[in-house]
Every structure is written in C-alpha cells, then in structure tokens.
Image (tube, rainbow, N blue to C red):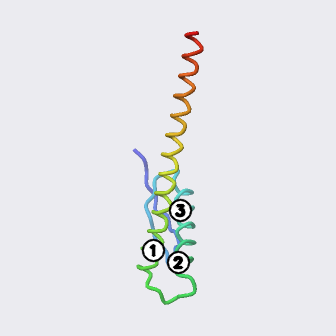
Amino acid sequence: MSSTEAVSVRVLDREYTVGVGAGEVEGLMAAARVLDARMREVRGANRMAAIDRVAVLAALNLAHELEQLRRDAERRDRELADALSALELKLDALLDA
C-alpha cells in the first residue's frame, strides 16, 4: 500500500496543500512550477484578472500542448512502425533470395 503525504505548493501567490504518493513529490513540485509560470504568463500585466479565468486559460493552454505532444508521438509511432515494416519486408526478400 502506498503512503500519501501532504505537500504544500504555491501557485500564483496562493498556497495549496495536495496529497501525493511517496516518490512523486518532485514531480508535483515541477508541475506546480510549470502551472505557476503559465498562469503568470496568462495573467500578464492584468493583476485584476479573475483567478478562475486565469486558471482555466492556463489549463486550456497546457491541455492543448499535451494534445499536440500526443499527436506528435502517435505520428512518430506510425512512422516507426512503417519503417520497421519496410525493413522487415527487405529482410524477408533477402532471406528468400
């Protein structure tokens, strides 16, 4: 059974306590830094922007990037599978000759 510990992270000058599994603290802290930076970027100079709007826009930006990375990975996987299939056909042809 994995243990969970409470970790405090700071995002856009607000502190949040999050439960995280053992060994995942560094990942959570890195994610909090990314989110904080993205929210600050979205908020820009408009310090009066509603935090929920800033959070949603930052989340949409991050989700869009994630989706692009997934599509790129799928494309690379297809290209790799195609290249391996072509190599397999060449090897089969060489072995049959």
Compare marks 2 and 1 and give the one earlier in the sequence: 2
Would residue 52 be found to the left or right of residue 26 on screen?
left
Q: Is residue 66 above or below residue 14?
A: above
Q: Are marks 3 and 1 in contact (CB under 8 Å)?
A: no
Compare marks 3 and 2 and give the one earlier in the sequence: 3
Q: Quadrant of the C terminus?
A: top right
Tag on residue 57? 1
The residue lying at 57 percent from left, 72 percent from top is 37
Residue furthest top as drawn: 97
In the image, 66 versus 4, the foreground residue is 66
Q: Is residue 76 above or below residue 91?
A: below
Question: Residue 12: x and y, percent?
Answer: 53, 77
The residue lying at 52 percent from left, 77 percent from top is 42
Q: CA distance from mark 3 to mark 1?
A: 16 Å
Q: Residues within 10 Å of mark 3 (few under 14, many from 20)?
A: few
Q: CA distance from mark 2 to mark 1?
A: 7 Å
Compare marks 3 and 1 and give the one earlier in the sequence: 3
In the image, 37 versus 64, the foreground residue is 64
Question: Which residue position is annotated with label 3?
Answer: 31
